[in-house]
Amino acid sequence: MIETFRIAVFALVLVLPVTAFAAKKQYRLEVDGLACPFCAYGIEKKLTQTKGLESIDIDINAGTVTVTMAKGASLSKAQASQIVKDSGFRLRTFSKLAK
């Protein structure tokens, strides 16, 4: 019984640091030309094709797109720039948000 407990505690100690590094990542994209719901839909449509995407939040008034990636997935500036460009817009800034 005590040996089983020790093994369980040891396994937990090994897993905790890994899960801390596998946290979800969020990115903020500032997009030039994002002015209407149709514009937002175009970017959203392209972003939903991104592997590991969890959610998208678009603020038309601020011209920003917040992207949340699933655990273990990430989005590079080059990927984001290409997605925005393919949507017909220009990526002004790309930043990783602290979680």
Image (spheres, rainbow, N blue to C red):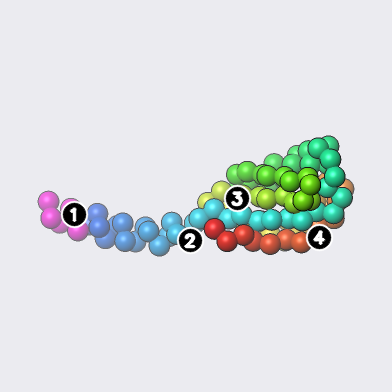
Q: Nearer the viewer, mark 1 or mark 4?
A: 4
Residue 57, placed above or below residue 25: above
Cα distance in 3D space between marks 2 and 1: 25 Å
Q: Circle 2: is it few (<14), some (14-19), or many (20+) Cα within 10 Å?
A: few
Q: Nearer the viewer, mark 4 or mark 3?
A: 4
Q: Circle 1: is it few (<14), some (14-19), or many (20+) Cα within 10 Å?
A: few
Residue 69's disc number: 3
Q: Taking 98 as reference, is 89 left or right?
A: right
Residue 92's disc number: 4
Q: Nearer the viewer, mark 2 or mark 4?
A: 4
Residue 5's disc number: 1
Label located before the other in sequence (2 or 3): 2
Residue 99's disc number: none
Cα distance in 3D space between marks 4 and 3: 20 Å
Residue 11, placed above or below residue 61: below
Tell me the amino acid under the disc marked 2.
Phe
Which span is picked out in magenta? Answer: 1-6
Q: Nearer the viewer, mark 1 or mark 3?
A: 3
Residue 21's disc number: 2
Q: Secondary structure at mark 3?
A: strand
Could you say which is closer to the camera, residue 78 or residue 40?
A: 40
* Image x and y of residue 84, in percent: 80, 51
Tell me the amino acid under the disc marked 1.
Phe
Could you say which is closer to the camera, residue 79 or residue 62?
A: 62
Cα distance in 3D space between marks 2 and 4: 28 Å
Cα distance in 3D space between marks 2 and 3: 13 Å
Q: Circle 3: is it few (<14), some (14-19), or many (20+) Cα within 10 Å?
A: many
Residue drawn at x 54%, y 58% as measured from the top left: 99
